[in-house]
Amino acid sequence: MRISVDRSRCEGHGLCTQQAPAVFSLDDNAELNHRFEDTDIPAEHLPAAQAGIGSCPVAALRTSFEPYR
């Protein structure tokens, strides 16, 4: 599973970072980063990553099971 971030939607609420701090972080400008950009999320981080994705109040995070092209 991979995560894509719609940066135009993200408002920097940080709820995803609270749910999955090993996956998501906010920089000093409240810009969202995620540790596994352009790569599959390791299985041990999947439950937290999914909780973080589900917590986004503006639906800026999406999952993909397809490889990036």
Image (tube, rainbow, N blue to C red):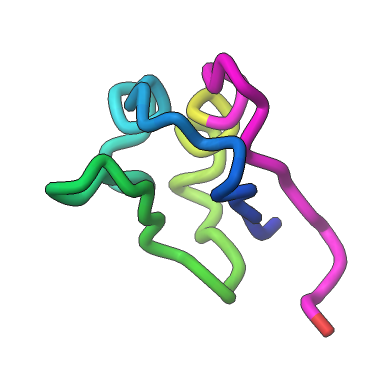
For the C terminus, give its image quadrant: bottom right
Give the image quarter of residue 57: top right
Taking 61 as reference, is 11 left or right?
left
Q: Which of 67 and 59 is in front in this view?
A: 59
Residue 2 in the image: state x and y as whole percent: 66, 59
For the N terminus, give its image quadrant: bottom right
Numbered circles on residues, count: 0
Taking 57 as reference, is 67 left or right?
right
Read off the magenta span: 53-68
Taking 57 as reference, is 26 left or right?
left
What residue sits 53% from the left and 24% below the top? 51
What residue sits 45% from the left and 46% below the top? 45
What residue sits 33% from the left and 26% below the top? 14
What residue sits 51% from the left and 36% below the top? 10
Taking 4 as reference, is 14 left or right?
left
Q: Residue furthest bottom?
A: 69
Q: Check residue 40 for magenta coloring.
A: no
Q: Nearer the viewer, residue 2 or 58?
A: 58
Residue 26 in the image: state x and y as whole percent: 25, 44
Q: Check residue 59 for magenta coloring.
A: yes
Q: Which residue lies furthest to the left in this view?
A: 28
Give the image quarter of residue 21: top left
